Amino acid sequence: MIRFTTAGESHGQALISVLEGMPAGVPLLAEDVNTELARRQQGYGRGRRMQIERDTAELLSGVRAGETLGSPISMLIRNRDWANWLEIMDPAPREGDAAGPRRRAVTRVRPGHADLTGILKYDRDDARDILERASARETTARVAAGAIAKRLLAELGVTIGSHLVHLGGVDAVRPTEMPSDLNAASDESQLRTLDADAERVMIERIDAAKKEGNTLGGICEVVVDGLPVGLGSHVSWDRKLDGRLGAAMMSIPAVKGVEIGMGFGAARVTGAQVHDEIEPAPGRARAGGVRRPTNNAGGLEGGMTTGEPLVIKVAMKPISTLMRPLGTVDMATGEAAKATAERSDVTAVPAMGVIAEAMAALVLADAMLEKFGGDSLTEVQRNLNAYLSHLAARLGS
Amino acid sequence: MIRFTTAGESHGQALISVLEGMPAGVPLLAEDVNTELARRQQGYGRGRRMQIERDTAELLSGVRAGETLGSPISMLIRNRDWANWLEIMDPAPREGDAAGPRRRAVTRVRPGHADLTGILKYDRDDARDILERASARETTARVAAGAIAKRLLAELGVTIGSHLVHLGGVDAVRPTEMPSDLNAASDESQLRTLDADAERVMIERIDAAKKEGNTLGGICEVVVDGLPVGLGSHVSWDRKLDGRLGAAMMSIPAVKGVEIGMGFGAARVTGAQVHDEIEPAPGRARAGGVRRPTNNAGGLEGGMTTGEPLVIKVAMKPISTLMRPLGTVDMATGEAAKATAERSDVTAVPAMGVIAEAMAALVLADAMLEKFGGDSLTEVQRNLNAYLSHLAARLGS
Amino acid sequence: MIRFTTAGESHGQALISVLEGMPAGVPLLAEDVNTELARRQQGYGRGRRMQIERDTAELLSGVRAGETLGSPISMLIRNRDWANWLEIMDPAPREGDAAGPRRRAVTRVRPGHADLTGILKYDRDDARDILERASARETTARVAAGAIAKRLLAELGVTIGSHLVHLGGVDAVRPTEMPSDLNAASDESQLRTLDADAERVMIERIDAAKKEGNTLGGICEVVVDGLPVGLGSHVSWDRKLDGRLGAAMMSIPAVKGVEIGMGFGAARVTGAQVHDEIEPAPGRARAGGVRRPTNNAGGLEGGMTTGEPLVIKVAMKPISTLMRPLGTVDMATGEAAKATAERSDVTAVPAMGVIAEAMAALVLADAMLEKFGGDSLTEVQRNLNAYLSHLAARLGS
Amino acid sequence: MIRFTTAGESHGQALISVLEGMPAGVPLLAEDVNTELARRQQGYGRGRRMQIERDTAELLSGVRAGETLGSPISMLIRNRDWANWLEIMDPAPREGDAAGPRRRAVTRVRPGHADLTGILKYDRDDARDILERASARETTARVAAGAIAKRLLAELGVTIGSHLVHLGGVDAVRPTEMPSDLNAASDESQLRTLDADAERVMIERIDAAKKEGNTLGGICEVVVDGLPVGLGSHVSWDRKLDGRLGAAMMSIPAVKGVEIGMGFGAARVTGAQVHDEIEPAPGRARAGGVRRPTNNAGGLEGGMTTGEPLVIKVAMKPISTLMRPLGTVDMATGEAAKATAERSDVTAVPAMGVIAEAMAALVLADAMLEKFGGDSLTEVQRNLNAYLSHLAARLGS
């Protein structure tokens, strides 16, 4: 069982990411993590902070001489402008803290954010006590943990990539054949899309939105190759891989929808158009010795992987912080007010794809260990390979 | 913390549903459960089995004199045609069991089902060992548990309903004003839709699909009223209510997509069109003393309830069992084959709405107890009311 | 991951036991369960109810043709005198239920029981609403689930037994060499002890206690043979097998203490007297190719199995229901009162050993699946054997 | 629900402690944590490292202006001699890492430690990869998290203390009346015992053991005052507070036994000598308006708190690292060898009491939040007080 925990406020001293339950012997360098952190920070339409924060993770535990130890892996990711925020975010009380309102207190709660729901739930006066944690900066720590899960999956023959398929009203066309290295291709693009024509239009939309102080959402597709048939389970509702992936994706800030395979499209056509026929293909052990010429199911049937590529679509709403302030309430007075206008990114959809990859990696690494057990990489590999050999023998290949 | 477990094969002796963690003192009759079981069985386009099985739950534990005790509530739901299946599904071995293949063994695995993934994962020869559990019949036990969660929620002022918004290519128009009792309205319809015009076209589609041995999918919308602001949390990825609801919905058999509020639609427009403005409304304590004239967020911001109606859309693919058999592999021989053609429903989307209500009820009852604690209904109510009074006082109402 | 849930009141209609997460293909007959249920009911000093209730489990799900399917295994264990209790324990309200006190209501709460703590926590007037679930009868459902875990462990070369080592002030002497089949030997004894001399004295104590309306406690020792080295883990507090076993044992009703190996005795001597030296023994693959001439650690070091026998001692207080009533409070009046005197067993320590075996089996089956993964018995065995071969190769055997 | 995670190797860069699920608004200063860390480091018989490491925790997240925010609280505790260990413990590979054995590799595995079980489980060659995490240094991070749980409990009227009751064969006499501030009294003693006479003999034993290169174990008692009746539950095995406390205690390194109240002693006497009678005491709301003149149950009945003091005894074996090396196997050669003799403490029992307090605090804070819910300190207090008022009204006080 893999467990991961993140901690840290957006303008606090640092983020912490702890990944517990990784097998020993997985090759791991800080660069493996930092490469993914850098991918999260790319993307046309990002604001100034992405420049300030060139995130790097320090491996504090769980790794020695470039290999995991089986013990919890903790990472420290410093917030670079901490010195400027110390007075505001200091864990220790400062003179006058009891007396007056907090420094840079936020009481005109911002629509679309956790500001209002959070201060009511947690009984706070200053929405900064909420928004610092609700900030998407937290996803940095997820990407760090996900990078390690990806390292494990890579050693087991599984690769995860993503690309942007919609931004701000513009659809990208999925290529008829996916590139063999999806991320190598999508990371080439400023928006992480495979459709260069669509990209041009999207960039125009971003520029226009920026001018009018508006923001844009979009959709990313995550594709996972190399999964063996039989991860997840049909036996109980909370073992179904669809549900576990759904939870992971819907937990990403600003995500409002998730689909597996055809998704909502499958609801609009007939069964004959949806179900993937099966044909023998003895050499394909990971798929159980069969092939499905179509993959409308997106790689999951009955809550389990089929061995075909896992395909997930994730929809993100536009960033909630607008330059054109929305109507709200000032919680200090109860009066109608305008939400604080803050400098903000126009869109974070390209980064969301990277985050979704990380979340998928964490779920799938967990599902792998669940099926194959194993406390060391060699043991996991041994058990996986024995399973694949057993599958290969089944259809007489 | 609420936990629920289901057990039982589709043609086994019975289904079992166990709900653990309910407070004591909640009024509960078998009829409360049976009413929901009957709702699950309605719907135009269902086949013969729905007539055979008039499901009823026997309360075996956790309830006395019409009130819950705080102990695990277990329910037995008998499969009425067990006598006919005893020989095939007997837990005990019968003469010849070791020697030959199982009775009514399924080896021509059906596309779109768990048949193939399941037998490979669990190393079975007969896909019946898988399909009996993967069958949607399991959802009966979910609806039973969900009915109890609904009873608790009702005592806390929360009501859950659903309606069908799409079927087989036909959209239903959402009424401009939702009926005050959603289920009273939708249960009037054979398809559980609020749009009588659309219903007529949908029924034509079902009849046509039936004639050609085809099946249809669709989309339901779940609406929850009366939730207080502040269920769920922004602090950790797995506490976000979006994720927990996403997992619950995606775990329903044949569901391929889920949306909160505008969902995928939010990815296609600008921030100015998406974010719900906030205005003071001191009388609305459950919403924290504010009102949002729009509810594009679908009742969740920052992973927490806003106090506005929670709105979830769930997409179901067409039923996988077609009368026109699909190409597959016979796992006994490894040869290409046609999947067994079986009598089947044309669509189960109306029932899926009822199942989605149940899953939502289980997640939300859990979220209520998480925030308000409480081991008896009076204690939960007392804590909820104290919170609402505190909220009411905040905006000086 | 194995999960198990029990449900049912002592005088309700039935008990339910659900075991979720078992691999497929494990041979399982109802007799395997019923044998263990019968073992729980034996023991000198038990009262009349043990005769009324010859417990048998009906396998409702998860098993077909004598093999597990991988799906949840649910069992129904009927309470035989249900007809006599129907009026008192009916889940449905009966005429007059609202008006007056419950039938056979208990308000003079019994010391040493959950009666008082339970009615205060759950806000009940009638302690029967609590005591029916707090009754040790619930352990029947645990033993049923444990019997299945034992079947799995047996297929993996692991056997679990127990014997009584203390009763009512009388110590049994542990034989210098343990019998090769521990339960075959201890089940021969009316008290499940290996020391026939001590047994005679214990029986005298039981007879004497019975005469004076008193009760007796005692200590059992559970011994598990055949565990491979490396179950559990040192890496996180809640993965340590000591803790997981401690939780399982301390959750048995009336248990007040647990020890691994030397236990409290280890606190009273020096390190030189406690720590087990290690010597090479290449043939012992399950112990990692070594031998420890002593086993003071009781088979656990660093939270992990060593491969030596796991030895756990469990202390049970005397049964709380005395014939000589204890002073208490009548919760209906607030006045001092005498607790109801009820017919009761004198001691349940022999049965407690069987329950402790079941709890150990559930924890260890879970730990096995955690390390070796596997969805079918053959897969678990394959992974275990590959691990043992790898260990054997390490010390060049 | 409270979750806590620790990370870090003994000679790594730092320890990390993350506490998730704390309500907002709890007053918290770094000093609150550091005071507990210092208490863990005291105790006669500790070696040199306790002087090197004056542990201090840096609050990295979850706290602002001296109050918790409801978000995960992470703490960094630096290992002060990291500079000296960098070469050995560097997460990054160094030149020659692949070629030869690790620096300061441990292959003569030490009996009584996780060394051997760990390298076999995790397939490592160098036992340092195991022992660095299995070291009792990890408990520093537990004490840090426990200190925060204690702060919460203190605000709810609950105090936790401990004292040493046995060391190396010497029993301390429990005073007839416990001091009102237990830790104020026990922390005065070098061994954290309340019996000054016993302490003198214990110190002699420690000095003697030191001379002969031996080590000593012992027993601590944890006492918790102010708990309200009704934490934990009887309804399901894993909700019983006995089991949850048992798991927490047995997870402390070197702990081999745990008892609640009379513990093993209750197994040796009759029911009449064990069960605590109950008498009316309307003013004692936390105990439900009753008093038990005795507290043999140790504050738990039916898996729930009674409102009387919770009393837990925890037995620790002698430290496993002896100066007189024990026989073992060199895993590099498979030959018999002597375990490395290392400088070590003679005993850590006084510190273990502080660790046991921390573990108890974490379990009990979780049980409080489970019963009373609440996202802010004021909400938890409000719900607790309403419950106490309700209890007070029950017995007409």
Image (cartoon, coloured by chain):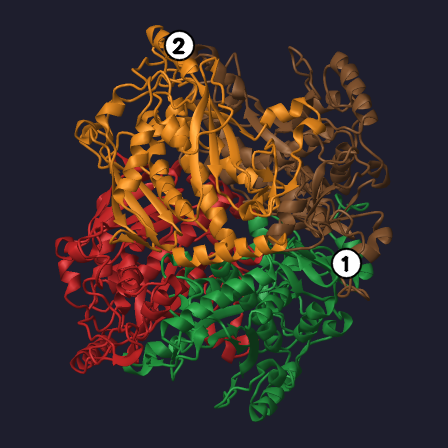
Chain colours: A brown, B orange, C red, D green
Q: Give yes or no for contact between labels 1 and 2 (Cβ–Cβ under 8 Å).
A: no
Pointer 2 local density, CA inside 10 Å: few below 14, some 14–19, many at least 20: many
Q: Position of residue A377 (x, y in %)?
A: 61, 40
Q: Position of residue B220 (x, y in %)?
A: 46, 25
Pointer 1 local density, CA inside 10 Å: few below 14, some 14–19, many at least 20: few
Residue C153: image tag? none
The amino acid type found where label 1 is placed reads Pro
Report the quarter where the C terminus of chain D lies.
bottom left
Which residue lies under the disc numbered 2? B205
- Seen at 26% across and 38% down, the residue is B77
- Name the one closer to the observer, D112 or D379: D379
The amino acid type found where label 2 is placed reads Arg
Residue B207 horizontal side relative to residue D213, left or right: left
Q: Position of residue C16 (x, y in %)?
A: 28, 48
Residue D61 horizontal side relative to residue A387, left or right: right
- Name the one closer to the observer, D338 or B260: B260
Residue B21 horizontal side relative to residue D157, left or right: left
- Name the one closer to the observer, D381 or D240: D381
The answer to whether any part of residue C210 appears in the image is: yes
- Seen at 43% across and 37% down, the residue is B160
Which residue lies under the disc numbered 1? A101
| Residue D263 location, quadrant | bottom left
Give the total number of marks visible in the rendering: 2
CA gap between label 1 and label 2 equals: 63 Å
Q: In which chain is the residue bearing label 2? A: B
Helix, strand or loop at mark 1: loop
Residue D139 to residue C318: above or below: above
Residue A351 horizontal side relative to residue C272, left or right: right
Q: In which chain is the residue bearing label 1? A: A
Name the front one of labels 1 and 2.
1
Helix, strand or loop at mark 2: helix
